[in-house]
């Protein structure tokens, strides 16, 4: 009887689409590092972000910033009358702070 119940539980399981969407954002290479930099240094110009994530090409960094902006995780800030552009986290992006802290704890424990 327990085996039937266990099989039913396994058959009923499916990943939540929102959970899957979240991992499609956070799991994409470089996104977590971009978010981490912006959590620690809230406003960054492109060149500053690139210097923190030096293994990422400028082309890929540009793509990831656009994608994170489309997902409303970061915002691209422009300044009237200036050529200055920088990036910062949106409120949605800042709410990832505890998630990133939990990832730090896990990596400190398990990634030697």
Image (tube, rainbow, N blue to C red):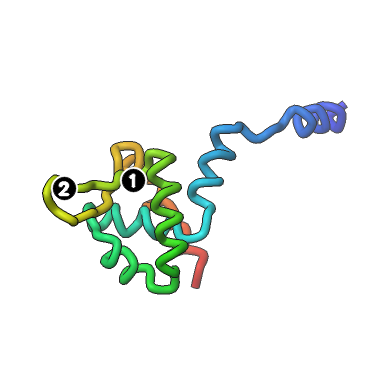
Q: Which residue has dot 2 on it?
A: 79
Residue drawn at x 31%, y 63% is 49
Q: Find residue 13 and report its horizontal and vertical position in percent.
A: 71, 32
On the image, the x and y values in percent for residue 31 come to 44, 55
Q: Residues within 10 Å of mark 2 (few under 14, many from 20)?
A: few
- Look at the numbered discs 2 and 1 and tell me whether their residues touch, using CB distance below 8 Å: no
Taking the image as shown, residue 76 lies to the left or right of residue 31, namely left
Q: Quadrant of residue 50?
A: bottom left
* Whole-number angstrom distance, CA of label 2 to CA of label 1: 16 Å
Provide the secondary structure element on which disc 1 rests.
Answer: strand
Residue pictured at 69% horizontal, 33% vertical: 14
**Image quarter of the N terminus:** top right
From this view, report whether residue 32 is shown above or below residue 54. Answer: above
Q: Dot 1: within a 10 Å radius of its alpha carbon, few (fewer than 14), some, or many (20 or more) residues?
A: many
Give the mark nearest the N terminus, 2 or 1. 1
Between marks 2 and 1 in the image, the one whose residue lies nearer the viewer: 2
Q: Nearer the viewer, residue 13 or 94?
A: 94
Residue ID for mark 1: 74
Q: Which mark is residue 45?
A: none
Q: Secondary structure at mark 2?
A: loop
Q: Along the line of sight, which residue is nearer the eye, 63 or 93? A: 63
Establish if 5 lies above or below 25. Answer: above
The mark tally for this picture is 2
Q: Residue furthest left?
A: 81
Q: Residue shown at 51%/41% (left/top)?
A: 22
Q: Position of residue 96 (x, y in %)?
A: 37, 44
- Image quarter of residue 104: bottom left
In-front residue for pair 110/47: 47
41 displayed left or right of 4: left
Residue 18 image offset from top left, x and y in percent: 54, 33
**Vertical relation: 102 (above or below) 1:** below
């Amino acid at each position: 009887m327990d085996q039937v119940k266990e099989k039913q539980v396994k058959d009923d399981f499916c990943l939540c689409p929102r959970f899957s969407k979240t991992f499609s954002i956070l799991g994409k290479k470089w996104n977590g590092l971009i978010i981490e930099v912006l959590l620690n240094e809230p406003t960054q110009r492109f060149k500053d972000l690139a210097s923190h994530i030096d293994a990422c090409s400028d082309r890929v960094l540009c793509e990831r910033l656009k994608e994170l902006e489309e997902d409303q995780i970061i915002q691209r800030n422009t300044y009237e009358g200036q050529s200055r552009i920088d990036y910062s986290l949106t409120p949605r992006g800042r709410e990832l702070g505890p998630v990133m802290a939990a990832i730090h704890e896990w990596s400190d424990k398990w990634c030697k």
